[in-house]
Image (cartoon, rainbow, N blue to C red):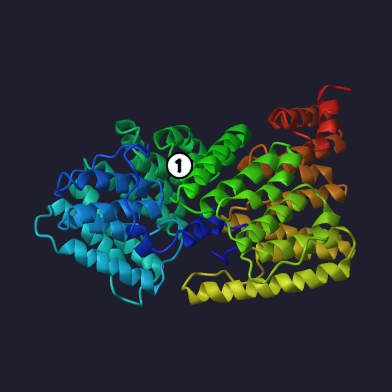
Amino acid sequence: MRQISFRSSIAVFFLSSLILGVGSTAHARSRAARGPEEHVGNVNFPTSCSPQAQPALEKGLALLHSFQYQESAQAFGDAAQRDGQCAMAYWGEAMALYHQLWDLPNAATLAEGRKDVELARKPTAQTPREREYVAAAAAFYQDDPKLSHTDRRQAYSAAMQKLYSDNPKDVEAGAFYALSLVALAGDGVDELANRRKAIAILNPLFEQQPNNPGVAHYLIHASDTPELAKEGLPAARAYARIAPDSSHATHMPSHIFRRLGLWQEMIDSNLAAIAAAAEATQAHRGDASYQFHPMHFLDYAYLQSGQESKARHLVEEVRTVPGAKAEDVADHQSLFAARNAIELHRWKEAASLAIPDERLTWQDTTYWARAIGSARSGDVSGAQEDARKLAEIMKAQEAHEKEQGNKVTPGESVEESEVAGWLVYAQGKAEDAVADLRRAATREETESEDPFAMPAREMLADLLLELKRPSEALTEYQTVLKDYPNRFDALYGAARSAEAAANPQQARKYYAQLVTISLPGADRPELQAARSFASGH
């Protein structure tokens, strides 16, 4: 793994910001759980808690399954108030602090989790099964500063494996065990094997309880790779129906829709999530971060479906997010603007992006786009200056990741190699440029990085096409399309490459596909040529 950047796997970049803004746990616990009219999915979780506490406990669990951590903590806190001897309410509060796929808990969070675990251990009426749940949480929160985050994940996963083995009919135990495997995969521990193992556990559970939010949600996360995405499609199409009042649940299917290039479904999913998040924020049940995340996905889907005007409008629409802080608005506007400029090949626009505030999370994105835009516009000195600034930011991020105990691969980041490639190309060194971009593509793929902008291999293909090597370019575009189906630039580039290689039949196929995936609002200028060629004119 390397330092966090906007090109990193979607589980980190924006999802971490989703958590950082949810407010203090103390504040969350001081408020009542949400009302019974909400639809957040069905769970069956028998416990030794009182009948008065059980509904709030199960609501907390359903919300926990949808990563609505703030609201989950509220519900578990309500259960604890109704029954001070409800061990699983305190277990739930501890679990609401453990964001398994998102952020790394700091020392204060670990200490707070340990306090919840100790409270969960006090009641004497808990069942052996409940004690195993508490023991699993304790395995994660154990008081040992030498443990890495991966060590904690592995200890928790081993405890959940035992729990599920001892209680094979406990669907919730199976779901949480599978999630622990996905979390380990995210840490690079037997990544594909752990994902497949999680899917093997979850699929039969999904058949048994098709309305369980955790089972559907975790199937989507387990399948969120190019190799496995098709296996997550049934769960993706079910999850929003299972928990329509959860903004994260309505958004989450778009992870699979993106993997499969299903742009209309991805757009619909995120529009629904944005509406749900805005409603929750206005009702003081969430904050702006839950709306920013689906907007991030929506911008990408607009670009890939040919809708340039809608993507550009979204940059301004960020200003209307309820409850958003000025710095968060600026952060997301800069990210969307940078990605739009690169995806649309607007090089002078990219080069002239405003210098970001150094406090912004995604300032590296702007310098990356500025450097590429300057290089592709022929401004070598400007590109060199932005490349220098990008390298400083990446170095600082790498140092931070090391301080957090995370593994960082040495050498240039993907972004730095991409910038280096276009910079030497601007200096007339074509073969050096090809080598730099090929190195970037290899690193991106070897480390299973998940670019939420133009993949490095697509940049390589663009370069080869500019160098009038269309057959080589076509091969690279085809490789991109295997992992990222229906990407607009890859389809357009493949069509142009086939056309330049004197293969009109193949060119027509790609142009026709580009027209097909472009939605009614599509206005990208490339479509004019695509429609003309595809129709035979």
Q: Quadrant of the N terminus?
A: bottom right
Residue 6 in which image quadrant = bottom right
Q: Is residue 479 left or right of residue 153?
A: right
Q: Is residue 317 above or below residue 392?
A: above
Residue 348 coordinates in the image, percent (x, y): 86, 56
Residue 264 coordinates in the image, percent (x, y): 62, 32
Q: Is residue 283 above or below residue 411?
A: above
Residue 370 coordinates in the image, percent (x, y): 78, 62
Q: Quadrant of the C terminus?
A: top right
In the image shown, does 224 or 312 lie closer to the viewer? 312
Residue 164 coordinates in the image, percent (x, y): 24, 48
Q: Is residue 93 left or right of residue 298?
A: left
Q: Residue placed at 40% from the left, 34% from the top?
A: 242
Q: Is residue 405 above or below residue 215?
A: below
Q: Is residue 431 visible?
A: no
Secondary structure beneath dot 1 equals helix
Q: Is residue 351 visible?
A: yes
In the image shown, does 389 or 245 lie closer to the viewer? 245
Q: Residue placed at 57% from the left, 66% from the top?
A: 2
Tag 1: Cα neighbours inside 10 Å, few (<14), some, or many (≥20)?
Answer: many
Number of marks in the rendered image: 1
In the image shown, does 20 or 44 lie closer to the viewer? 20
What residue does disc 1 label?
Answer: 249
Identify which amino acid the numbered label 1 is placed on. Answer: Ala
